[in-house]
Amino acid sequence: MSKADYELLASFRYALRKFLGFSENAAIEHGISPQQYQVLLAIEGFPGRNWVTMGELAEQMRIAHHSAVGMVDRMEGLGLVKRVSSEHDRRAVQVSVTRKGHCILEKLYRIHRAELRSVGPQLAALLQKAASRAPE
């Protein structure tokens, strides 16, 4: 790899970290933790439906099942999510976002969308440049 390859990768990671830092601060400013924001987004952004099982949430968050349960416990206590037993499998729990959670998620979506309009072209250009470089 050349010096330019390392510089490109470093620039891309720096731009990602800046966006992630922005995202973490935005969540905190809206009264939730960055991980709670990620949980709300993982639930509402799950393909094809607006709920997830604990196992799916754990996978989306890349955490252990018991950690997902603990996170949902805390978020349910804050009124951000709710869980119900599955009608098809009483062992399964479906987790969904509450009205309060939706309100916060919508505000954060708008803020993130505006930020992506600003930094998105830079991220896309760096990604495209990195992907198009011939391997050495």
Image (tube, rainbow, N blue to C red):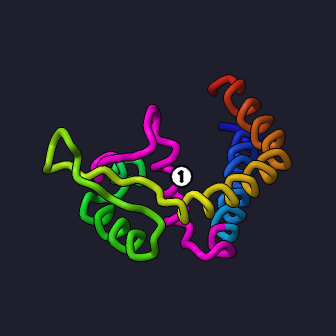
The one nearer the camera, 128 or 60, is 60
Q: Residues within 10 Å of mark 1 (few under 14, many from 20)?
A: some
In the displayed structure, 95 sits above or below 77; it is above
Residue 104 % position (x, y): 62, 63
For residue 53: magenta?
yes
Residue drawn at x 76%, y 42% as measured from the top left: 123
The N terminus lies in which quarter of the figure? top right
Q: Which residue is mark 1?
A: 41
Residue 41 % position (x, y): 53, 52
The one nearer the camera, 98 or 2, is 98
Residue 9 % position (x, y): 68, 45
Which of the 4 image quadrants contains residue 17?
A: bottom right
Question: What residue type is disc 1 on?
Answer: Leu
Residue drawn at x 71%, y 27% as measured from the top left: 133
Q: Is residue 65 left or right of residue 78?
A: left
Residue drawn at x 75%, y 48% as measured from the top left: 113
SS state under label 1: helix
Residue furthest out toward the right = 118
The one nearer the camera, 89 or 29, is 89
The C terminus lies in which quarter of the figure? top right
The one nearer the camera, 91 or 62, is 91
Residue 132 % position (x, y): 71, 24
Q: How many marks?
A: 1
In the displayed structure, 34 sits above or below 52; it is below
> Which portion, as a residue range, is magenta?
27-56
For residue 49: magenta?
yes
Q: Is residue 102 left or right of residue 13?
A: left
Residue drawn at x 26%, y 58% as measured from the top left: 65
